[in-house]
Amino acid sequence: VQGQTKTYYTNVGTGVNWLEVDLNWGNQANSLSLTIYKPSGSSIGTYYDSSDGVIDGRIHIDIVPGQGYVEAGQWMYKVYGVSVVGTEDYNFNVYQH
């Protein structure tokens, strides 16, 4: 719902080259945001529907480090209801490559 934050965690092992993060709610009338935190606690950013270049009710972000592997440990993701009428269902997935 609007103003609500849901928090999710994934454990990333050593040797992971990149993460594919996908938040899909499909309803362009509602707006969600996604903030991603590395295991060290620092945020890599807050993303919105338009962050991937398309307004389609989906945030699809690839996290690719400049060199080496993605930081191993527990990653945290916060989904926030920016502007939601009623309740918005969504799918949230993180793929390790």
Image: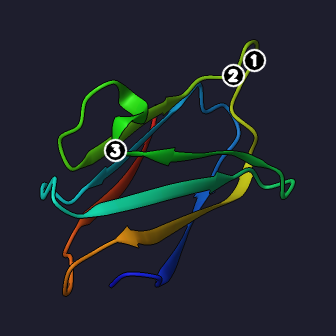
Of the image marks 3 and 2, the number of the one nearer the N terminus: 3
Q: Nearer the viewer, mark 3 or mark 2?
A: 3
Rendering coords of residue 7 (x, y %): 54, 76
- Judge whether 3 appears above or below 29 on screen: below
Q: Which residue is mark 1?
A: 68
Labels 2 and 1 touching (C-beta < 8 A):
yes
Residue 24: percent from the left, percent from the top? 23, 54
Badge nearest the viewer, 1 or 3: 3
Q: Which mark is residue 41?
A: none
Three-letter amino acid code at the position of disc 1: Gly
Dot 1, how many residues are within 10 Å of its Cα: few (below 14), some (14-19), or many (20+)? few
Determine whether, in the image, residue 48 is placed left or right of residue 31: right
Real-space Cα separation, disc 1 to disc 3, in angstroms? 29 Å
Q: Which residue is mark 3?
A: 49
Q: How many marks?
A: 3
What's the amino acid at mark 2?
Pro
Which amino acid type is marked by label 3? Asp
Please report the residue visible at 48 percent of the width from the left and 79 percent of the height from the top. Answer: 6
Task: State left or right for residue 17 relative to residue 20.
Answer: right
Give the residue number, with chain letter if any, for mark 2: 65
Q: Is residue 89 above or below residue 51?
A: below
Q: Secondary structure at mark 3?
A: helix
First along the sequence among labels 1 and 3: 3
